[in-house]
Image (cartoon, coloured by chain):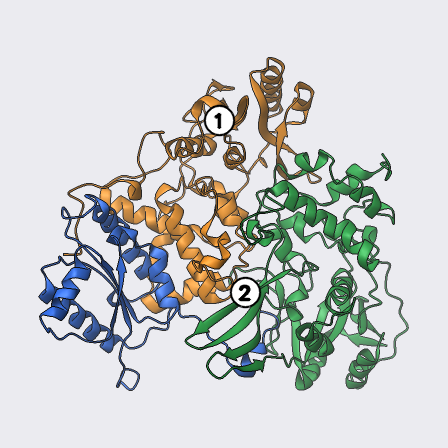
Amino acid sequence: MSDRQEKMRQSAEKLLRDGEVGYVIGWGATRFCDRTTPVFIDSPEGAASLVWNEHAVNSLAKYLLDDKYPDKKIGLFARGCESRAVNRMIKDNQVKRESLYLIGVPCDGKSSDRCRLCRERNPLVYDVLLWEPEANAAPADRFERVRGVEAMSPDERYRYWGGVYDRCIRCYACRNACPVCSCRECYVDMGRTGFQGKQHSRSDNQIFGVTRAFHVGDRCIECGECERACPMGLPIMGQTQKMLKEINELSGEYECGLDADSDSFLGRFDLDDKDEFM
Amino acid sequence: MELKKDRLLEALALLREGSDVALPLPADDGGEPAFRLWDGVQEPFLGSNTSLPPKELLFPRSEGMYGYNLKTGELSDILPEARTAVFGIRPCDVKSIENLDHAFLEKGYVDSYYRARRDGLTTIALGCSEAARTCFCDSMGVAPGDAPGADLMMNDLGDAYSVKANTEKGEAVAKLWEGLLSKGGAKAPAAPACGFSVKADDSLPDRLTARFDDPMWDSLSKACIGCGCCSFICPTCYCFDIGRENRGACGTAFRCWDSCMFSDYSRMAGGHNPRPSKKERLRNRYLHKLAYFSQRYGATLCVGCGRCIDKCPANLDITRVMDMMEGVDANG
Amino acid sequence: MSLTEGFEPKIIAFCCNWCTYTGADLAGLNRMKYPENVHVARVPCSGRVNPQFILRAFQKGCDGVMVCGCHPGDCHYSTGNYFTRRRFMLMKRMLEYNGIDPGRFHARWISGSEAAKFRDTVAEVSERLRKLGPNTKYREALREGADAGKGGAGI
């Protein structure tokens, strides 16, 4: 483990020393040994503070949206989940591949429930790979939880989601952690348009939850950051996973971020799509 | 005086005859431990502090303010009538209520909604016998074993709680519990040491505000994702927004929690935003907690409960800024 | 069924300017009778309808929502309704997944000449909603009088 950490530090140090990148986004230590925080290293000396262990959980890709037009390339440590997010961001015209230097770090598994659905530990796109690819672990049943909710009666389903959203504190951590949630201004923050009621009520919370899921569901890379970020531990991936399940059923095998060319489901159409509205 | 632990629920039931009783209750179906109204049966959650602060008792997430009818021009006040006793509130959270009192009741304006709930609230504090690793209240001027601001103070003595009334409201509770209390002179064991300590002395506010333009705010805020988690789980964050909901000619004005970490919080009419990015927003939040409030009210707004450190999705830590200020004076 | 007795559902129909809205107009010109429960909201294209509109309509008191546009291939903007089709196929499923009765949301293709189809669709939807009764799901709770002040812990 520490061997890999050393490789990462050396690689970041060299990139910064050679002026290849403006800064490197990685993980750094916090007060607690079982937690890391994203760090932004802009000097070769700073590379010594990079950390790699099973607690390097946060997905780093979202931070690319803070700096869409960098003067120099941004160095980003990329695992499978970061690389899928980058693919999605490139397709969505959020970032340019040429402004990134992706340092591939095959993931050796993290101590987080967010990795439950991980199907791709190795970066799918990178400029350099720091060590040998890892074997992918068998992910949990992709739609198990969705099927659990589907099995309920309509009223039970409503009660279930109502109960979930009753506990939502509307901090929008799910939105802000999501790497494919990329609007410059969120509809939620357009207070006076009336799109989203601001009260902390079941109704407003539910509408936020369903709308958020709908906005990102067809581009979801299933990284699990939304659930990890949720301070209330709400099972909100149940909504986005439902979108993916339905898309899989409607248009065949569907997974996001595996390449940077595929349209999202709602961003394209087929003339011979199923028609239920005749 | 002391109250045997096995008579706690009895004591709470007595309280419940005269008012609502709020307790720290465990996570119900997957939620987080929080102060909720007691149904008279559930066991309180006393192992550690709750994930959600008790501020909801005084400052609900959403509350109606007044109703109106545009046709008749009628206005109707909506004033809360709450009588609540809260048990199991920790010294840091008691301190947070003192801070909310400053904000809502002082400096020439009394918030009538807060006032009504505050008057109806009796606080029964429980001293900490164990500190979480994120606790740093003793650095912020709170004693983990004692809450002088509480109406009634209780401490864990092993098989009993010591009971000490601090106010008239507290005396009333002690009187109500008369039959359950027994004489006991046991001294509460020493309060535990906090998870860690930071240096936050009287000069911190000035030292911080002198560094308003310091590049450190860039580095501190980079990892922030800009959500409002820290504000909503903070026991002392009290910002709100006011809105209206209309049905035909009738409507209600309401207020609801808001966070200075959101972009629309500081956006002005016309679209200008004086805090355009998370750097300015995070700086404002930190400075409000550690400097502005102290300069205005003479009390640090941060009470050291550690909730934001525990829950931040990016694992940001407000105490880092205090560490960075160590050895830095206001002039340099 | 006392709940539904004498109940008149409130329906909002988002109608594309180029087809269904014209079709509804034609129904009026032809003196066709259809249930007055429906409130027509004109949109430039059915592709303009945002899923948010549907949720908001339920929240604000509608018992049913319709989205009506041009038949696939006939879109005034060539492709708008193809996007509508995908979007609302998903939305319909999401609503059901969240516990909304499938009878409360309908999407239909109705052209400018199909006045009778508009009439029949509205009649059919309104009849179905009359049986379902008032919608309570996603409905915002209105604060009234002193009740509004009761907040406190554990909302």
The answer to which of C26 and B139 lies nearer the viewer is: C26
Q: Are marks 1 and 2 on the same chain?
A: no
Q: In what element is the residue under mark 2? A: loop
Q: Quadrant of residue C94?
A: bottom left
Give the chain ID for the green colour: B
Instruction: State the quadrant of the C terminus of chain B.
Output: top right
Residue at coordinates 20% horizontally, 70% vertically from top-left?
C125
Q: Position of residue B27 (x, y in %)?
A: 57, 62
In the image, is A158 to the left or to the right of A39?
left
- Residue with the mark numbered 2: B28
A252 lies above or below B292: above
Which chain: orange? Answer: A
Q: Which chain is blue?
A: C
Q: Position of residue B159 (x, y in %)?
A: 78, 69
Q: Can you identify the residue that label 1 sits on?
A: A106
User: Residue A187 at what x, y percent from top left?
Assistant: 45, 52
Q: Secondary structure at mark 1?
A: loop
Label 1, label 2: how many angstroms apart (C-alpha)? 38 Å
Q: Amino acid at mark 2?
A: Asp
Q: How many marks?
A: 2
Q: Which residue in the rendered view is the most extreme toward the top?
A: A18
Amino acid, disc 1:
Pro
